[in-house]
Amino acid sequence: MKSSLPLTSLNHISIVCKSVERSLDFYQNVLGFCPIRRPGSFDFNGAWLFSYGIGIHLLQAENPEDLSEKKEINPKDNHISFQCESMVAVERKLKEMSIDYVQRRVEEGGIFVDQLFFHDPDGFMVEICNCDNLPLVPLGADSPRVCARVGVPFKKNQQSHQQPQIVQCHPTTINVKEDCSLCM
């Protein structure tokens, strides 16, 4: 078995912005992130935000006019995804805010996942979904494993339809986490 890097969680994503102020407004008022202090030693404009166990670092583009405009919402583009409690409430709020979005539905073995895709002010893709509906089933390993979201031992090709619980995936151990981390 190969040894991977000793990581614990996703810390942040960085997004280069045409306007940090405009993006700051979007990430606060649309997605609910809170601004946090960023090191004063940085010699460039930016902002840090935090919520849902993840940070977003906004970086002012050196040449904002050189950033390309993304008009088409393409669900297969790079994106960050957030789990939600109510897809209906999210869709209603996006309509109230006049934010264009694309809706998709994925089906796997009778389980449905709904997705809404939209852009931030700089064209970075955001997805909102109910992806916790799908069980996470590890690929390849012959040994029993416990996998994220369900505290049930999984064997290859076994699925569970129980209420999701956030766990970390390790051979023969269960570690419940407050954040949604998965290690395979």
Image: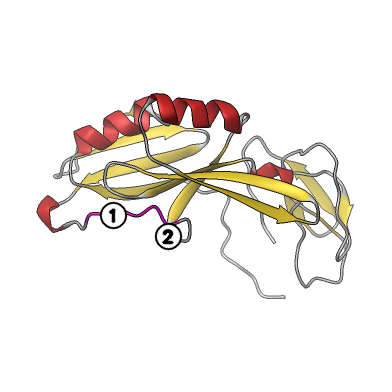
Query: From the image, which quarter does the C terminus lie in?
Result: bottom right
State which quarter of the image contains the N terminus.
bottom right
Disc 2 target residue: 77
Q: Could you tell me which secondary element the residue under label 1 belongs to?
A: loop
Query: Does residue 15 appear left or right of residue 127 in this picture?
Result: left
Q: Which of the 4 quarters of the picture holds residue 179? A: top right
Viewer-closest of 41 and 153? 153
Read off the residue under disc 1.
Answer: 70
Mark 2 residue type: Asp
**How far is mark 1 from mark 2, CA to CA?**
10 Å
Q: Is residue 55 shown to the viewer in this render?
A: yes
User: Could you say which is closer to the camera, residue 37 or residue 121?
Assistant: 121
Residue 137 higher or lower than 38, as above or below: below
Which of the two discs, 1 and 2, labels the residue nearer the N terminus? 1
- Are the residues at dot 1 and dot 2 in contact (C-beta closer than 8 Å)? yes
Q: How is this picture coloured?
A: secondary structure
Q: Which residues make up the magenta segment?
A: 69-74
